[in-house]
Amino acid sequence: MPVAELDKFVLRLRDGDDVGVLKKTIKAGTELADEALKMTAAETIPAGHKISLQRVSDGDPVRKYGQIIGFAEGSIEQGDHVHTHNLVCRDYDREHAYCADYKTTKYYPDAEKRTFMGFARPGGRAATRNYIAVISNVNCSNSVSRYVAERFCGEDFRRQYPNVDGVIALKTQGGCGVEPGGPMQLIRRTLGNMARHPNISGYVMIGLGCEDNQIKGIREDYDLDNLQEGEIQPEFMTIQGSGGSLKTIEAAVKAVENILPKVTGICRTELPLSKLILAENCGGSDGNSGCTANPALGVASDELVKHGGTSVLAETTEIYGAEHLLTNRAATTEVAEKLMRQIHWWEDYARRHDSTIDNNPSVGNKEGGLTTIYEKSLGALAKGGQAPLMAVYDYAELIDTPGFGFMDTPGYDPVSMTGLVAGGCNV
């Protein structure tokens, strides 16, 4: 069998890595070589999976991206397929050096800063969409909110209100049987900040009336009645107070009809990129994600930051094992410590439920070549580029610091994106 050029088959990410990522499937017995290395594939290995570049002894760490992605279970020989059968996740101490890698962002000069067409909002914020929202504060009012939103759709609606992107129903799966304190505040923070999202020009909030999460509490906690100049007065109602579901639907439809003329007059204007807040979330990752799509998004994230904008990474369980790379580039010790408190909360959560954070990657992730949570996290972190970590946010907390940030969310995409959007992300 002829010798193949190593770099045509294998992507080596960092000097000193123990493994490389296969660009295409390699057959057992294939010889690979370059000027410094010659090896033979011990078995057929799929594209996106890892091949060992050198021998690793039993129990020793295995490195990819220049970082530990797991530990050898049994000796791994050069040319072996490195995956779930011989690579395991074990606890180890990450090398934290808070703020040691912090570098001040070099912003583009004003003459080079780019713009986008968006909607200017009161308070200096900006929107990428012009929505009216029908918001449920409890799952009991979800159907009513949906029926209201469905009254405003179709070609006739779009022709009549060309500047309105739609009337949308924002539903919640909780709101009753909720403990006071932290759990209640989490729901209220999500709903309160969603109501004030820049992409929402006006809204109607609908409750049942007897739920634990009273609309009054959201209004008070998030000061929803204190409007800035130019903001549209919202409407609040309950199904019980309005006389039932049908009467509530009609009342809410009238409320939306009153808001629509005010919203349709708002037009897009040229705005600076500094007004954008980018939400970064993982999808179906495989062995290529950390080498291709995620680093590409990292470049875009850094570009946005250089224009004065904001980029926010999320999913705490999917940076686990790579968190030291964030604390080391944190702007302040306080920022780094807040991130570590969130990491420790998830560690404790997994212990309390007799589980482990390494139950992620998923089946699909593993089929695509990912093996441990450390490996997945290092690839996911590439979405954050190289900008310094300027802020860390709790779930659905208002994003108020320009630059690169991180939000504590679960690895479950719909819930994670909800937190980012509630925080104010508009892309």
Image (spheres, rainbow, N blue to C red):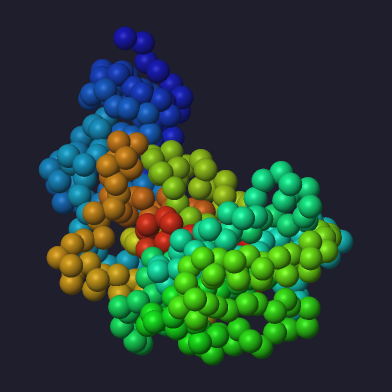
Where is residue 245 shown, x and y percent of the image?
48, 68
- For residue 410, which quarter of the picture? bottom left
266 sits to left or right of 57:
right
Q: Is residue 163 visible?
A: yes
Considering depth in this image, is 284 or 169 the residue closer to the camera?
169
Q: Residue at x 36, y 11 (%)?
A: 2
> Which quadrant: the N terminus?
top left
Considering depth in this image, is 335 or 8 the residue closer to the camera?
335
Q: Residue at x 22, y 67 (%)?
A: 350
Q: Residue at x 47, y 72 (%)?
A: 244
Considering depth in this image, is 171 or 426 the residue closer to the camera?
171
> Which quadrant: the C terminus?
bottom right
351 sits to left or right of 138:
left
Question: In the picture shown, does residue 16 fall above or below 41?
Answer: below
Where is residue 370 shown, x and y percent of the image?
32, 43
- For residue 391, which quarter of the picture? bottom right
User: In the rendered picture of this protein, how many numbered marks are placed on residues?
Assistant: 0
Q: Residue at x 52, y 43 (%)?
A: 293
Question: In the picture shown, does residue 318 fall above or below 137?
Answer: above
Q: Is residue 326 visible?
A: no
213 sits to left or right of 235:
left
Considering depth in this image, is 28 or 168 the residue closer to the camera?
168
Question: In the picture shown, does residue 5 fall above or below 20?
Answer: above
Where is residue 218 shown, x and y percent of the image?
50, 83
Where is residue 12 shown, x and y percent of the image?
42, 38
154 sits to left or right of 414:
right
